[in-house]
Image (cartoon, grey):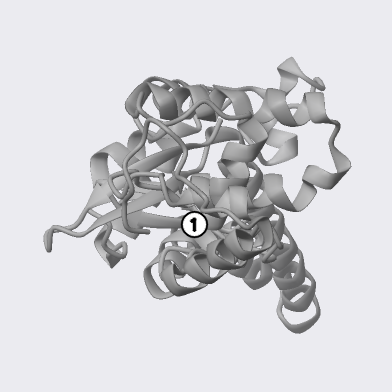
Amino acid sequence: MDTAAQVVTPENIAFEYRVAGPFLRLAALLLDWLIIGVLLILVRIASAFLLSFAIANAVLLLSVFILMWFYGALFEAYWNGVTPGKAALRLRVISTDGRAVSGLQAFGRNVFRFVDLMPWVPLTVFWGIRAETSGFSGAPLFLVALLSATLTRNYRRVGDLVCGTMVIVEEREWRPQIMHVATPTVVSLARQIPDTFRVSRTLRRAVARYVERRSHLSPERRAEMARWLLEAFRGRYPQFPSVAPDLFLLALYYRIFIADRDRDEAILDQHRVQQGAQVTPLPGAPKVAV
């Protein structure tokens, strides 16, 4: 349930982010709650050994208040929108205009989290535990957060809507493994891909991984995986020649990661010498700069 969102900053610079879905964010929240629980246990143990019973209870209650209300806000404000739970799952809170989250936004969205957790169901519904003996009045069902995230763009809960924030997934640094695909046919076809064709970061990665793994795929599977992209491309550029889908992806890969005019000419010249004839461009598409 993750999607992409494009953010245009006040400086008119566009960034594309992968937006975190509600279930990935729930996992990060549960990790943070686990950390809070461990911290409270440590506080309880330490205060029981060092303080009297009454003061130890007061310290525990104060610790609960501080951690529940300020744990997320302080981490997000001073750790650039990240809590330990979010860091484990590579999530980050940012403003909807692409800027870093402010302290006021961090505090506000954490305050409204208690609205997102509603409704609360008494524990007696599940285990027959009385509230006065358990210390808790109920368990959250997260229905408000789930409903808000499902019905709004970029999966924003109530706290995000009020404070103008959203949660994104940080992409790990990725570098493709350069594969040898520079055959004369691929080079000639790559030179005919129009300059107006723009390749997104997601498409770059998809094409690179396809070429890296194509040797493990059957010819039928290659054609099945590459056909949809070729059809979409030919819909925009009908003058592009009819080629095998796998060959088109090899040419697109070469164009994205390898293409160099001098190298292209050297490869084609060498091929002409070997063939003893001039290589003509594929029909139906003009020569364009790579």
The quarter in which the C terminus is drawn is bottom left
Task: Judge from the rendering whether residue 261 lies leftward or rightward of residue 48; answer left or right.
Answer: left
Q: SS class of the residue under badge 1?
A: helix
| Front residue (pair 162, 226) | 226
Q: In the rendered image of this protein, does residue 198 appear above or below residue 1?
A: below
* Residue labelled with disc 1: 256
**Which residue is the extreme one toward the bottom?**
50
* Residue occupying image coordinates x 56% and y 56%: 254
In which quadrant of the rendered view does residue 99 lie? Answer: bottom left
In which quadrant of the rendered view does residue 226 lie? Answer: top right
Residue 194 image point, x, y percent = 33, 44
Q: In the rendered image of this protein, does residue 288 appear above or below residue 243?
A: below
Residue 109 image point, x, y percent = 35, 48
Is residue 91 visible in the rendered structure shown here?
A: no
| Front residue (pair 53, 146) | 146
The quarter in which the N terminus is drawn is top right
Please tell me how many numbered marks the rendered image carries: 1
Task: Judge from the rendering whether residue 266 lies leftward or rightward of residue 233; answer left or right.
Answer: right
Mark 1: which amino acid? Ile
* Residue occupying image coordinates x 79% and y 72%: 45
Q: In the rendered image of this protein, does residue 134 appear above or below residue 79?
A: above
Residue 81 image point, x, y percent = 42, 63
* Residue occupying image coordinates x 74% and y 31%: 222
